[in-house]
Structure formats: C-alpha cells, structure tokens
C-alpha cells in the first residue's frame, strides 16, 4: 500500500478541524496537510503542515497537491445550507467549482482516493420522509442541496468515465463540541448545548416537532475514514451513501438536555431555516453503507448528550 499523503480542504470548519486531528494521529502529523481559505490557526496550525487554499482556484489546487505530493484528499470546503440561501451564487461557485477542481486533480494528478461529502440536503419535499431509501427522488429546494445532488452525479460520472476513486456520504446534521458549525440548518442542534451550559435558556430557530437525522462527530469521523479505507471491490455506490445514526425532534433534544440541566428553558421562534428543514427527511435507511462497508454508529441520543455537556462544561 502507498504511503498516505493527505490534504484536507476546509480544514478550519466543523468537520475538517476534528477530522484533521484524527488523520494526523493515524497517518503521522507530517503527512496530513490542513488547508482552508482562512489561515489555519490554533491546534490545527500547531500540529502539522497548514496552508491557505481557495478551492475555487484551480491552479492553486493543483500547485498545492503537487507541492505536498498528495495522494488522498478529504474535500470539506463548502458553503452550507443557510449561508447558501443568503448567497446562492457563492454557494454554487464554492461547492461546484471547488469540487470539480478536486475531481479534475484526481484525474490529472492520479490521486488515489478522494472524499467529497454530500448531505441530507440532497433530498427534497417529494422524497419519502421516513426511512428515506438509498435510491430515491432527489429534488432539493436549496442551492446547497442542488450543489450536493450535482456533486454526487458528477462524482459518479468521473468514477465511471475516468476510473478515479471518489467516495462520499450524505451526512446528516453533525453535532460537535470543538468547532462551531458553519451556517447550516441543523446548527440549532449544536447551539442548544452551548446555550444550555452558558445561559440555561435557548431560543430555537426551528419548531419543537421538527425531526431531522443527526450524528455525533466521533461517528461522523469514523464513517468518513472507514469509507475512505473500504475495499474498493465491496463498494457498489460511490458518492451518495445514505448515513444515519440518530433522529430526534428539537423538543426531544431539549428534554434530553433538561435531564442534566434542570430548569433548562427552550422557546421556539422558527425563521427561514424552518422552510429548509421541512424539505429534509426525518429518518434515513443507511443499509447500503452498512452492507457495503460495515457502517454502524456508536453514539445514541443519551450518551451523546452526556458527552457534549461534559465537554462544553470543561471548555466554557
Ligand atoms: P463548515 O462550514 O464548518 O466548514 C467549511 C470550511 O470551508 C470553512 O472552514 C470555510 O472557511 C471553508 N471554505 C469556504 N469557502 C472556501 C473556499 N473557497 N476554499 C477553501 N475553503 C473554503 O462545513 P462542515 O460542516 O465542516 O462541512 C464539511 C462538509 O460536510 C461539507 O461538504 C458539507 O456540505 C458537508 N456536510 C456537513 C454537515 C454538517 O452538519 N456539518 C452535514 C451534511 C454535510
Ligand atoms: N448540516 C447541514 C446544513 O444544515 C446539512 O448538510 O446545511
């Protein structure tokens, strides 16, 4: 097996910042380059090579990959759903041109493996809302969702047309304690923990009965690396694996937190993100991921809530 030389794009983001640390521990800190359009700093900068990289700049992408002799890319740079609705042209540019540049690099520079995430945002209101199948209707209503469906299709095209190895999952909303989420619709499921610890009250921007698929960061990272390392022969799909761990309403999450933060008060004031949430599924059928590369989550609502509160209490 070739020695891994990994580059993470969007490494300052919610997922990239934690993924980079795990990859550095796994492959050696010198072998994992953290890049972002923002200058990497903090633990990320102190624990291995870092660089500024705008993924929409094709020349810069190619130069960076060659400079570090990269053979594996985790492409985490993106504009998420809520920011994407405020800035749709930016969302298209970063999500599509960024991904195309990475895919072209896979072909032209002969990268071994590329991970490009998709999202539950690929689904839309016509998609079956419960136990959403692997193969289903993909008619999103957000620019972010449009870029995710296009990214899946393009990735599959590059895999078949050029024989490159591009893989991806449809992440649910990711909950984590290290880096704040970067402008998505599922951000309330992280914000609520911070406010519970800091203030004991929270004003939630979706309705109490809004139910969405979610996942705790350790499961997200496990899934991402397991997929990247899965035996290619066992994979039937490439860029569009459904992935599930938890599904709960905003009210159920509040109630679980209240078990550990007595008197925690939550009010509900839905904003424009409610309309986005209403187009996404409640529960996901991830049997393809389970069958093809052995995916299974470790975290449930109860132990995730305890762990989040413990980590945030130590941090804040
Ligand atoms: P994030 O918003 O937290 O981080 C994205 C990073 O990309 C940021 O650090 C930002 O500075 C960087 N970036 C923006 N424009 C860039 C550019 N032109 N060039 C380089 N970097 C740029 O996002 P995340 O939550 O870490 O998401 C990572 C991936 O996972 C994305 O593809 C996202 O769509 C997907 N995803 C995330 C979630 C979630 O809940 N976090 C859910 C589903 C899918
Ligand atoms: N968490 C992401 C968002 O809300 C889903 O892709 O945008």
Image (cartoon, rainbow, N blue to C red):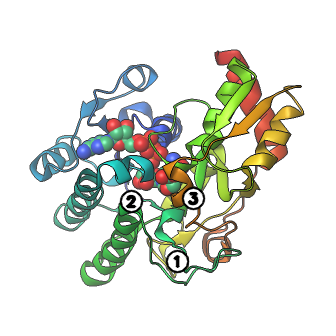
* Residue 48 % position (x, y): 38, 27
10 Å neighbourhood of mark 3: few (<14), some, or many (≥20)? Answer: many
* Residue 184 % position (x, y): 48, 47
278 or 233: nearer the eye? Answer: 278
259 or 291: nearer the eye? Answer: 259
Q: Is mark 2 within 8 Å of ligand 2?
A: yes
* Residue 151 % position (x, y): 34, 68
Figure quadrant of residue 304: top right
Give the residue at x 70% y 74%: 130
Q: Name the residue under label 1.
A: 235
Give the residue at x 43% y 49%: 82
Q: Is mark 3 within 8 Å of ligand 2?
A: no
Q: Mark 3 points at which residue?
A: 277
Label 2 close to label 3 by CB (< 8 Å)? no
- Label 3: element kind: helix
10 Å neighbourhood of mark 2: few (<14), some, or many (≥20)? Answer: many
Q: Reading the chain from its start, which is encountered first: label 2 or label 3?
A: 2
Quadrant in which the C terminus appears: top right
Give the residue at x 42% y 19%: 42
- Label 1: element kind: loop
10 Å neighbourhood of mark 1: few (<14), some, or many (≥20)? Answer: some
* Residue 201 % position (x, y): 73, 26
Front tag of 2 and 1: 2
In the visual, does 95 lie left or right of 104?
A: right
Residue 144 numbered mark, or none: 2
- Position above or below: 134 against 39: below
């Amino acid at each position: 097996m070739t020695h891994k030389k990994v580059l993470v794009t969007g490494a300052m983001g919610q997922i990239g910042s934690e993924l980079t640390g795990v990859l550095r521990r796994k492959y050696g800190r010198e072998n994992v380059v953290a890049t972002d359009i923002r200058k990497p700093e903090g633990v990320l900068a102190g624990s291995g090579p870092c660089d500024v990289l705008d993924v929409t700049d094709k020349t810069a992408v190619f130069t960076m990959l060659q400079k570090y002799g990269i053979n594996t890319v985790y492409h985490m740079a993106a504009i998420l759903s809520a920011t994407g609705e405020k800035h749709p042209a930016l969302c298209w540019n970063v999500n599509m041109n960024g991904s195309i540049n990475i895919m072209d690099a896979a072909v032209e520079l002969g990268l071994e493996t590329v991970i490009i995430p998709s999202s539950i945002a690929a689904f839309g209101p016509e998609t079956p809302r419960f136990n959403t199948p692997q193969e289903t209707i993909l008619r999103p209503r957000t620019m972010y969702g449009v870029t995710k469906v296009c990214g899946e299709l393009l990735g599959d095209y590059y895999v078949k047309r050029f024989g490159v190895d591009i893989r991806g999952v449809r992440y649910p909303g990711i909950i984590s304690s290290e880096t704040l989420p970067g402008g998505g619709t599922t951000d309330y499921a992280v914000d609520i923990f911070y406010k519970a610890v800091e203030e004991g009250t929270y004003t939630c921007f979706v309705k109490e009965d809004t139910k969405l698929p979610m996942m705790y960061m350790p499961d997200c990272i496990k899934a991402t690396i397991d997929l990247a390392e899965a035996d290619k022969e066992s994979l039937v799909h490439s860029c569009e694996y459904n992935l599930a761990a938890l599904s709960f309403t905003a009210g159920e999450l509040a109630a679980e937190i209240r078990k550990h933060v007595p008197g925690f008060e939550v009010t509900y004031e839905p904003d424009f993100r409610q309309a986005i949430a209403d187009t996404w599924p409640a529960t996901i059928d991830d049997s393809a991921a389970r069958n093809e590369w052995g995916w299974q989550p470790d975290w449930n609502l109860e132990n995730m809530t305890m762990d989040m509160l413990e980590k945030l209490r130590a941090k804040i």
